[in-house]
Image: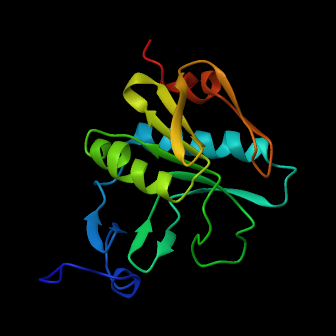
Amino acid sequence: MGAIDYYTYNDYAQWKGDWELIGGEAVAMAPSPMVTHQAIAAELIRLLGNEIEACDACLVLGEEDWKIDEATVVRPDVVLTCNEKGQEHLTKTPEIVVEIVSRQSARKDEQIKFALYEAEKVPYYILIYPNETKAKIYRLIDGYFSKEGDFFDEEYTFEGLTCKATISFARLFRKFRKR
């Protein structure tokens, strides 16, 4: 990028390639995700989309920029966002944020984004581990993420969202289990 140590959204908007901007720092995204990563994201978008089909207020999106402020723009793998139609990018805190964890993204997803999403008061943060066909769900309680559990085949119903939603992890991971 250059000798500048602090970037803003105006800088970010000019960059080519896949970047995120976290606290004014340019963060290169990992190379193009593996097929399993993309397939799990697509399946999750389909499952959540079906869950909220009757809800006109919410959308399920994949890899959409979320402009948190002038120094922070992230691109979660999947989000459930409400009352956000007609924008160039996300500007409101999503109700669910999902990151699909790879070896290259683990530190960023489990530590940096974990803290960022907690500070932004994301109601639910899900980390998905494709190689283990496992999801960890965190729920924001009193301003901090509390782990709801590890999910392999279970269903989880999200409480307190604008639209009712349940994820069946058996359905999500069905095609990706090692036989």
What count of labels does the image hold?
0
Residue at x 51%, y 44% (from the top left corner) = 144
| Residue sitting at the far left | 3
> Can you name the residue that lies furthest to the top here?
179
Q: Is residue 65 above or below residue 129?
A: below
Above/below status of 55 relative to 42 = below
Quarter holding the N terminus? Answer: bottom left
Whether residue 5 is situated above or below residue 128 in the rendered picture: below
Q: Which residue is depicted at the point 50% across and 68% down?
A: 65
Q: Position of residue 37 (x, y in %)?
A: 43, 41
Q: Quadrant of the C terminus?
A: top left
Q: Closer to the camera, 174 or 143?
A: 143
Q: Nearer the viewer, residue 143 or 30?
A: 143
**Residue at the spot x=43%, y=80% of the render?**
70
Percent position of residue 100, x then y: 43, 42
Q: Position of residue 103 (x, y in %)?
A: 26, 38
Residue 172 quadrant: top right
Q: Is residue 46 left or right of residue 127?
A: right
Colour convention? rainbow
Picture quadrant of residue 81: bottom right
Q: Is residue 33 left or right of residue 156?
A: left
Outermost residue on the front side: it is: 142
User: 171 or 21, which is in the foreground?
Assistant: 21
